[in-house]
Image (cartoon, grey):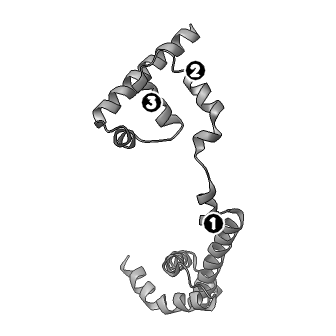
Amino acid sequence: MEGFDQLAKQYEPMIHKIISSLNIYKNKEDYYHIGLVGLWEAAEAFNPEKGEFTNYAYSYVKGQILNEMNRNNRFAERSIHQKEEYWETIEETNADQPLELEFLLSYCQGLTEKETKWVVYSCIDFLTVREIAEKENVSLSAVKQWRNGAKRKLKEQMMEIVD
């Protein structure tokens, strides 16, 4: 590995020059790392009979960085990121899900009120045990008891349906 450390130190300016020539200004450290990996791969695959290592390394490293840029650009083109204003206009999700809530509550027959709260908070609001405990001003162990009771009763109900 000492050999590669020396090689990396020797070709570090070349990698930075490639990054600069490609006008990369975001995520420079990531591209530098990709350049180092490319340098290592070039060193492994180099055939001295075909030319100088410096030329080969330059082409290989630049190719690896360009490939990564293309992958990142394709990902950015295919991804949609909403602006912050969009998320501020979204209303409470429960108001948009009356059927989901009604459907979920149909399975909660035979559960206590607290067990039903756990089911709704977990399945509709996607809250954790800790978040439910904070919202209901109870201990974590209380919410865990609600969860265990609800799971046990729901499982029993499902087993009755299957049988």
Residue 107 placement: quadrant: top right
Mark 3 — residue?
A: 117
| CA distance for labels 1 and 2 | 37 Å
Question: Residue 46: x percent and y percent?
Answer: 57, 80
Mark 2 — residue?
A: 106
| CA distance for labels 2 and 3 | 13 Å
From the viewer's perspective, tell me whether residue 61 is left or right of residue 136: right
Question: Residue 139: x percent and y percent?
Answer: 28, 36
| Secondary structure category for the residue under label 3 | helix
From the viewer's perspective, tell me whether residue 121 is left or right of residue 79: left
Q: Are marks 2 and 3 in contact (CB under 8 Å)?
A: no
Q: Is residue 52 visible?
A: no
From the viewer's perspective, tell me whether residue 77 is left or right of residue 113: right
Q: Is residue 145 visible?
A: yes
Closer to the chain start, of discs 1 and 2, is: 1
Residue at 61%, 90% (x, y): give it.
55
Residue type highlighted by circle 2? Ser
From the viewer's perspective, tell me whether residue 110 is left or right of residue 21: left
Residue type highlighted by circle 3? Lys
